[in-house]
Image (tube, helix red, strand yellow):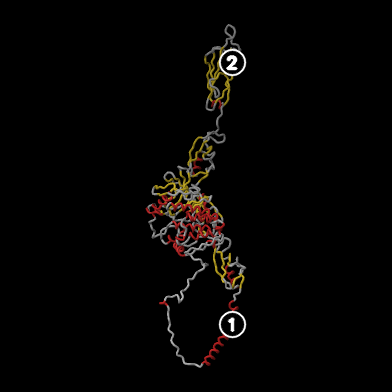
């Protein structure tokens, strides 16, 4: 899915979460240029009409809600048997992760978050929508502690709640109301019950009904009592514990009537006059310390005439006995009785205190000892031991971390002392990070207690860049975070190679070297070079040393060799004004045959070179043979020309080649 475009609009960036029936991806809305969350129905259910209807019902339910604490629905659609919902993207963590990181939460922080959850559920209930799966995993929190309730995947409209589930119980077992556990219909009070459990977990850091299987947990919801929150966290105000007790009442009629009532309770719970209010005892519950009134038993006289029994007294028919003998017998009997009473009284005064007196003993300090050592110490003091195992990050397994009553307390012999024994640091299941974007995993691991987190990037042609490929320890392995190094291997994308340096090599040699690295070669002419011979490699693009993926095109530029420069030369141009049949008599004077004044001739010399075009070099009158020196600049591969016109007639015209001058 990574990189796929859904409906040619939503580009999938990374996977951010999994649910029982769907997978959630982080995506980019290419039209509105914003990040969104795209929930995609798992392929296992894409052909199941019941699941599809339930999936679409989620979007339809939430789309009717408009509350700042409920995730907004933007779009819903289907493409190539892929059913999806586009939602608001929340950059944060789930409340479950928040509790793991910061729990138990301080009361004020917990109330701030709980009021937002209550507000969201109140709005949903007012619109006739029950969430039915309230749990910390379905509550998102951003960096500012703003809450968004999400995943109305099994929400049910109150007004149309005619469906009963007789073969399965929807929702998560740890947050399941007793009526849901019995297969009954969920109501708004089912959300109230789940809210109470979420509140319990936030303030204590523990679940009220832990268990290994959904069935076990469901039975506990129905039958078992939970440990009161203040026992686990004495810092919880009584007012907050009372809210939990009422929200988690097993009988729906004893719970709050609705979320608005809970919201009002939370608003005033931390007021000074409420913090130490009396503990709440529900009618359906039983307070072991409450006074019990025993109804009076009806007396005999109160019974009706039919219940009264009248006994007839038969007349005595004894034989007469002398009065004196009977009197003596009575005296003996009464004397024996009196003597016996006196003896018993004396014995009671002497022996009873010894029989009834139980000596006091001082509870010894056994904290820090092993459990066996502690038992021996307490047994020597004639004290019994009760063992309670707890997870402890500071003490190794088997060490006593607390005792009750505390050491130094005075108790009677044969009393019981409860020893709290460490079973070592808490073990947690390693989450499954494979397939998630590296930035997402870093966000999830923020504040984690791992001994160290090691990231390793490796190339991959099949896994998108920055996606986690493997992890160690494996997902779902139980470990102690503070003793564990978490190793995460992520993709760096297709394997990259370094462009070899082929400068100065011949074209064929460079091509072979580059192709051996899996690169494609394109050859083009380059520039002149004073150091690289013509036809050898001058440079490459990408440059040598740059990291590129295989099959990348590398352009090889070949040197033109040294660049030729313009040359400066000079040409000697002799101009003889005499006619061709005149001979040089060795004199500088051109005279006519009659010895008169020398004849004047008009000379014009023009030229073209690298700097000038048809330029006039000389335009003058001469009367004798003259030689001119013409300076010329000639570009490489080019030429220069000059022309001599004498008395209007071209007498010379010459071209000088660059190559001739260079040879010259």
State whether residue 75 appears in this view.
yes
Q: Which quadrant holds residue 587?
A: top right
Q: In front here: 265 or 355?
A: 265
Q: Secondary structure at mark 2?
A: strand
Q: Give the crowd class for mark 1: few <14, some 14-19, many >=20 residues within 10 Å.
A: few
Q: Give the crowd class for mark 2: few <14, some 14-19, many >=20 residues within 10 Å.
A: few
Could you tell me which quadrant the C terminus lies in?
A: top right
**Would you name the residue on which mark 2 appears?**
626
* Above or below, 455 relative to 572: below
* Above or below, 215 relative to 267: below
Q: In front here: 421 or 616?
A: 421
**Percent of width and height locating residue 584:** 58, 13
**Would you name the residue on which mark 1 appears?**
345
Assess whether mark 1 and mark 2 are in contact (beta carbons under 8 angstroms): no
User: In terms of sequence position, does the residue under pointer 2 or pointer 1 come before the other?
Assistant: 1
Q: Which quadrant holds residue 305?
A: bottom left
Q: Residue at x 43, y 44 (%)?
A: 9
Q: Residue at x 48, y 92 (%)?
A: 320
Q: Nearer the viewer, mark 2 or mark 1?
A: 1
Q: In front here: 166 or 4?
A: 166
**Percent of width and height locating residue 23:** 44, 52
Mark 2–mark 1 Cα distance, whole angstroms, equals: 174 Å
Extreme residue toward the bottom, this view: 322
**Percent of width and height locating residue 99:** 52, 56
State whether residue 442 appears in this view.
no
Q: Secondary structure at mark 1?
A: helix
């Amino acid at each position: 899915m990574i990189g796929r475009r859904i409906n040619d609009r939503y580009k999938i960036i990374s996977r951010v979460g999994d649910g029982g029936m769907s997978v959630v991806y982080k995506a980019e809305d290419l039209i509105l240029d914003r990040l969104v969350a795209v929930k995609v129905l798992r392929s296992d259910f894409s052909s199941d009409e019941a699941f599809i209807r339930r999936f679409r019902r989620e979007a339809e339910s939430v789309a009717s809600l408009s509350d700042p604490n409920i995730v907004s629905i933007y779009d819903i659609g289907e493409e190539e048997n892929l059913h999806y919902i586009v939602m608001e993207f929340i950059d944060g963590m789930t409340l479950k992760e928040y509790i793991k990181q910061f729990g138990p939460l301080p009361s004020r922080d917990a109330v701030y978050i709980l009021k937002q959850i209550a507000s969201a559920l109140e709005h949903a209930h007012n619109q006739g929508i029950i969430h039915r799966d309230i749990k910390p995993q379905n509550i998102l929190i951003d960096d500012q502690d703003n809450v968004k309730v999400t995943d109305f995947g099994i929400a049910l409209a109150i007004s149309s709640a005619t469906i009963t589930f007789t073969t399965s119980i929807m929702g998560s077992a740890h947050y399941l109301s007793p009526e849901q556990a019995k297969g009954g219909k969920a109501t708004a009070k089912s959300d109230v019950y789940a809210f109470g459990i979420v509140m319990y977990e936030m303030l204590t850091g523990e679940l009220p009904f832990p268990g290994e299987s959904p069935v076990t947990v469901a039975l506990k919801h129905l039958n078992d009592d939970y440990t009161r929150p203040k026992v686990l966290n004495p810092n919880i105000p009584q007012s907050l514990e009372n809210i939990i007790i009422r929200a988690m009442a097993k009988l729906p009629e004893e719970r709050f009537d609705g979320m608005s009532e809970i919201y009002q309770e939370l608003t005033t719970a931390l007021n000074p006059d409420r913090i130490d209010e009396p503990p709440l005892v529900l009618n359906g519950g039983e307070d072991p310390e409450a006074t019990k009134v025993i109804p009076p038993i009806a007396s005999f006289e109160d019974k009706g005439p039919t219940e009264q029994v009248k006994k007839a007294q038969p007349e005595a028919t004894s034989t007469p006995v002398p009065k004196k003998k009977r009197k003596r017998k009575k005296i003996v009997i009464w004397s024996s009785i009196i003597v016996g009473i006196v003896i018993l009284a004396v014995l009671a005064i002497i022996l009873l205190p010894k029989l009834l007196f139980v000596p006091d003993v001082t509870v010894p300090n056994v904290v820090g000892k092993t459990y066996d050592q502690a038992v021996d110490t307490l047994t020597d003091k004639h004290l019994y031991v009760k063992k309670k195992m707890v997870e402890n990050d500071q003490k190794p397994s088997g060490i006593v971390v607390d005792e009750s009553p505390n050491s130094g307390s005075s108790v009677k012999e044969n009393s019981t002392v409860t020893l709290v024994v460490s079973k070592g640091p808490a073990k947690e299941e390693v989450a499954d990070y494979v397939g998630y974007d590296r930035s997402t995993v870093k966000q999830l691991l923020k504040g984690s207690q791992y001994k160290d987190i090691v990231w390793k990037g490796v190339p991959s042609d099949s896994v998108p860049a920055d996606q986690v490929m493997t992890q160690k320890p494996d997902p779902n392995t139980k470990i102690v975070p503070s003793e564990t190094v978490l190793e995460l291997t992520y993709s760096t994308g297709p394997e990259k190679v370094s462009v070899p340096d082929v400068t100065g090599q011949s074209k064929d040699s460079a091509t072979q070297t580059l192709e051996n690295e899996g690169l494609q070669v394109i050859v083009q002419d380059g520039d002149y070079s004073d150091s690289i011979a013509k036809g050898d490699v001058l440079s490459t693009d990408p440059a040598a040393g740059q990291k590129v993926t295989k099959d990348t095109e590398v352009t090889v530029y070949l040197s033109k060799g040294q660049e030729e420069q313009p040359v400066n030369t000079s040409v000697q141009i002799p101009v003889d004004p005499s006619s061709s049949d005149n001979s040089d008599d060795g004199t500088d004077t051109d005279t006519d045959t009659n010895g008169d004044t020398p004849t004047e001739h008009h000379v014009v010399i023009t030229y073209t070179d690298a700097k000038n075009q048809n330029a006039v070099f000389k335009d003058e009158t001469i009367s004798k043979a003259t030689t001119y020196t013409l300076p010329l600049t000639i570009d490489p591969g080019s030429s220069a020309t000059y022309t001599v016109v004498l008395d209007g007639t071209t007498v010379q015209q010459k071209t000088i080649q660059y190559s001739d001058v260079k040879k010259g």
